[in-house]
Image (cartoon, grey):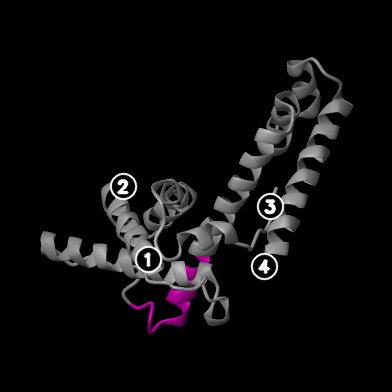
Amino acid sequence: MILMITTTNLSLLERMRGGSDERTWREFFRTYSPMLMSFARRLGLSDADADDAVQETLLAVHAAFRKMPEPFDRTKGRFKSWLRGIAKHKVRDVQRRHQKDARIEQHDVLAGAGADPETSSEVDALFELEWQRNLLARALEQVAREVDPAVYQAFELYAVHGNDPNKVAKLLGVSRNAVYISKTRVLKRVSRIIVELQEQGS
C-alpha cells in the first residue's frame, strides 16, 4: 500500500516561528527526527553519527524558526525542500568530521551532490522516500487512535502485513467480509486526513 502525502502540518510550523514552548518543540522533534534518522543512516552514517546529524539538523531548524517574525514563507520554497537542504548539509558535515578524526579516506555520498546532478537526485529521492513514509506513518497513527481497535487490527494484519484475509478473519473471530470492510474504512479515513492536510496548503 502506497499513499502519497505532500503537505506539512501548518499549525505546527506556525507555532514554531519566533520561538516555541517546550511542548511544541517536543512535537516537532517527535514528528521529524525518525525520518531524519532513517535518511542519515541510508546515506551511510552509523547510528551514533546519524544521531549527531539529526540533532544538528533540528537545532539548525529551531534556531532558524526563532528568527522568523512571520510564518514560514512558502513563496520562497516548500518546507520539505528547506529541511532537505539542511539535513544534507549536516550529514555532509558529520561525514567530513568523521573522516578527519579517523584520518582515513572514505567515500562521501554527498561530496559531489552540488556538482553531480545524478548524485544529488539520488540523495533527494532518498529524502523523498523517507518523507513519504514518515507522513504515511503519522496518518495511520491518527487513524489508529480514531477507529475501533478491532477494525484497525484487521486492517493492519490484512493490508499492512499482507496476511490472507481468511486467516485474519479466523484469528480475530470475524467474517472475511468484515476484514475487507475494515480495510475500506481505514483507507477512507486516511484519505480524508490527506484531504484535510491538502486544504491547509502544500
- 135 sits left or right of 195 in the view: left
Q: Residue 47 bears which disc, if any?
A: 2
Q: Which residue is mark 4?
A: 201
Most extreme residue toward the bottom is: 115
Label 4 near label 3: C-beta < 8 Å?
Answer: no
Is 88 drawn above or below residue 30 in the view shown?
below
Q: Which residue is mark 1?
A: 66
Q: Position of residue 72 (x, y in %)?
A: 51, 71
3 vs 4, front mark? 4
Residue depicted at 63% across the width and 62% down the height: 7
**Secondary structure type for disc 3:** loop
Neighbours of disc 1 within 10 Å: few (<14), some (14-19), many (20+)? some
Mark 3 or mark 4, earlier in chain: 3
State the residue position of label 3: 2
Measured from the top left, where is residue 65 in percent x and y? 41, 66
Task: Estimate the spatial distance between the alpha carbons at disc 3 and disc 1, rounded to whole Å.
Answer: 35 Å
Q: Is residue 20 above or below residue 172?
A: below
Q: CA distance from mark 2 to mark 1?
A: 28 Å
Observer-nearest residue: 110 or 147?
Answer: 147
